[in-house]
Amino acid sequence: MLRAGACDNDAFPPRPGTDTMQAKAHYLQLRPHDALPDLTHLAPFMAIVVIDDDSDEMWRWDVARWLVASGCRSMLAWGKECESWHDAVEDAALEAFDYDDIPPEQIVTVSQHADEDLDEVFWFARHRASHPALRLSTAVIMHVALRGRPDELLAQLAEA
């Protein structure tokens, strides 16, 4: 169950032949140091992390570990310090398997999009992002922000 203030959206219309995900989209706003909700019921899922506000390194690492443990198998980061978010999730995925071999279905693909517009990131998520062993049918827009924008971001993803 997503926390209060989170949104679900079934209006992520599949585009036959072009949509790599054909996913159900969810929105989750996280303010820095918010409690992290249970997302395991969405696993495996893609997280599109939209970072509008600053966060400290320790919280970012906690979120990265939580994403991996919750079933995130693909993470796209965009916004403030997205390179740091990329590195944190990549390291959390390796740490989860003690830096040993990772089974194909447990691999977490990561990308950061510092030099792209958010529209391009959403387009990439819908049309090009993929996992080597899984078909991800759920996307979570994880919005790190003091002020939420659920309708705007869900609509932007649906139109990508």
Image: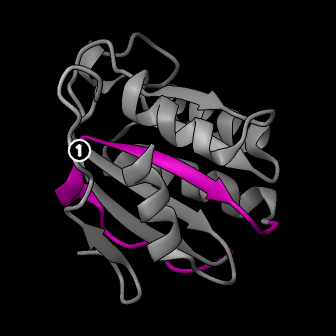
**Can residue 23 be found in the magenta stretch?**
no
The local secondary structure at tag 1 comes to: loop
Q: Is residue 49 magenta?
A: yes
Residue at left offset 50%, top offset 79%: 35
* Amino acid type assigned to the residue bearing label 1 in the image: Ala
| Mark 1, other Cα within 10 Å: few <14 / some 14–19 / many ≥20 | many
Is 63 on the left or on the right of 140, as rendered?
Answer: right
The quadrant of the image that shows the C terminus is top left
- 31 or 96, which lies in front? 31
Residue for badge 1: 23
The part of the chain drawn in magenta is 32-54
**Residue 24 pos. (x, y %):** 22, 53
What residue sits 43% from the left and 62% below the top?
A: 155
Residue 146, quarter of the rendered image: bottom right
**Is the residue 47 above or below the residue 8 in the image?**
above
Q: Please state which of residues 1 and 127 is positioned toward the viewer in this rendering.
A: 127
Residue at image x 31%, y 25%? 106
Residue 140 vertical placement versus 89 (above, below): below
